[in-house]
Amino acid sequence: MRTLARAPAARCVSIQRSRDRDVVKNARVATPRATIVPRGFRPNARASSRAGVVLDRSRSTVVAKSSSSDEAPRLTRSKTFTETFMTGVDVRAALDAGFGSVALLGATALSLMLANSAASGVWASFWHAHIGPAALGLNMSLHHWTNEGLMALFFFAVGLEIKREFVHGSLKSIKQAALPCIGALGGMIVPMGVYLALNNPAMTASAVVAGWAIPMATDIAFAMGVYNFFKNKLPGGVAAFLLTLATVDDLGAIAVIAVCFAKSLTMSYIAGAAAATGALFLACKKEVTNMAVYAGLGVALWYCLLQGGINADVAGVIAAFAVPGNAPAPAGSDATPEHEGGEPTLLDHLVHKFAPLSALVIMPLFALANTGVPLDASMIGKVFTEPVGQGIMFGLLLGKPVGIAGLSWLAVKAKVGTLPNGMNNVHLLIVGLLGGIGFTMCLFLVEMALAGNAAAANTGKLAVLVSSTLAALIGAGCMARLPDRDAKLKTA
């Protein structure tokens, strides 16, 4: 009797499961590029908005509410303008495919071409044209507006990611963050030491000591772009390690920019900047979520820093750090939550919205404004013969991998930190090589450190471009020689 009683129930369960499969199948046909997942579920992967790549995830994720057996999953609202251009191009898909890096490379190539063509004079004059109200001290060249204005928005995006890592990400756990932080420290100190060793005034009269900070930075967009081509050959822990390391690296570079490249200070404006900073963090403490408040205070802070003699781009980082870490995202936000199984926060939402602006607008414009270097035999030769060029090249190509891999290896041996699962010393060396891709951040440091020395600045920019390209090629070559992870699993 018990067997007969269970039989109808079993048939009902079988029929119900068949209906559920048909519902999901139909949903997938309707949205062929999406994966339907229950609300609250988060894939075991993280996206780096600046890098323009998604780690261990090849398709976009559409969140759906958990449905009953009789109704299909309900998809979220349609994509907003930040996700599609007027032509219908999917911006998120473009960023995931590394289009941000392609745009940056294209802008660099265009700038170099124009700077070495018959239109070079017009190109230079364009960037030196002044706009802005002189009464407010804002009559600046387009080049200056790009470096002091647009880059403040770039650093706002950087600051958002750094804070998100501290609140919900890989920097939340000291144990998890220890080894990448140690590697980042080595990746900053050793390149600076290499540069100073090659630019010792006692050894050469042409030494340029002021450029000591240039090789300390890593361009995470390019580093992750190169990684993305070979991610099937590397364990997933490599991506998290590289992202954490680059985050700490950026934080170090920002600190150096704020402290070491300040000009003559005007204390009245510094006091105004302090007041704006206090107001920002008071708004954070009160968990104010109206972004107009942060925008207004951020602009005031930017202006006070600019007039006060401190690099104004730091205002972007300070404003980002003041955004409440646990405040919920606006209703209907399609951002992916950083923390497992949670709802998206305001930080997630802002990172999601600023990714296209940073990757597809600000960084290419920065490259257009700052990479117009004259290319001739003598200039190229200076990269290899002048101390400033040698210091940058050896700092990025030798100092970065030695500092990152070497100090991390020593930390593992001393049991201060542990490598992520599946990651070995070869992968550690590859991370060090990718850390040598300085590009955007290093170019920015060239502008800061060598502002009063045009000849050294041109040599420094070219050295950054050459060494970053070589670091990318060497890193790609090393990864290409590794077997695929899938092949390893099949063999095992």
Image (cartoon, helix red, strand yellow):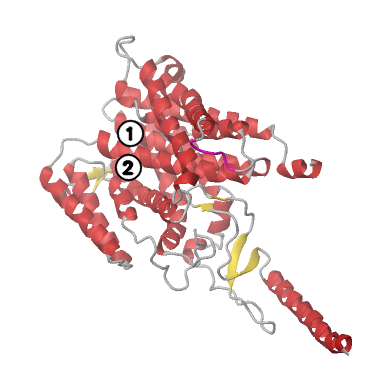
In this rendering, the answer to whether 75 lies above or below 271 is below
| Closest to the observer, 406 or 410 | 410
Q: How crowded is mark 2: few (under 14 residues within 10 Å), some or many (20 or more)?
A: many
Q: Is residue 481 left or right of residue 107?
A: right
Which span is picked out in magenta? 416-420
Q: Residues within 10 Å of mark 1 (few under 14, many from 20)?
A: many
Dots 2 and 1: beta carbons under 8 Å?
yes
Q: Where is residue 103 in the image (x, y as percent from the top left)?
A: 51, 45
**Residue farthest toward the top in the current orientation of the protein:** 203
**Residue 371 visible within the image:** no
- Quadrant position of the N terminus in the picture: bottom right
Q: Position of residue 26 (x, y in %)?
A: 72, 74
> In percent of the image, x 68 and y 73: which residue is there?
27
- Verify whether residue 11 appears in magenta: no
Q: Position of residue 240 (x, y in %)?
A: 54, 46
Q: Residue 147 carries which label?
A: 2
Q: Which mark is residue 63?
A: none
Under mark 2, the amino acid is Asn
- Quadrant position of the C terminus in the picture: top right
> In percent of the image, x 49 and y 58: which residue is there?
338
> In percent of the image, x 28 and y 30: which residue is there?
451
In this rendering, the answer to whether 285 lies above or below 149 is below
- Verify whether residue 418 appears in magenta: yes
Under mark 1, the amino acid is Glu
Q: Residue 447 carries which label?
A: 1
Name the image quarter holding residue 8.
Answer: bottom right
Prevailing secondary structure of the magenta residues: loop
Q: In this view, does 291 lie to the left or right of 340?
A: left
> In percent of the image, x 24 and y 61: which residue is there?
282
Q: Between marks 2 and 1, how big is the CA–CA gap?
A: 9 Å
User: Total label count?
Assistant: 2
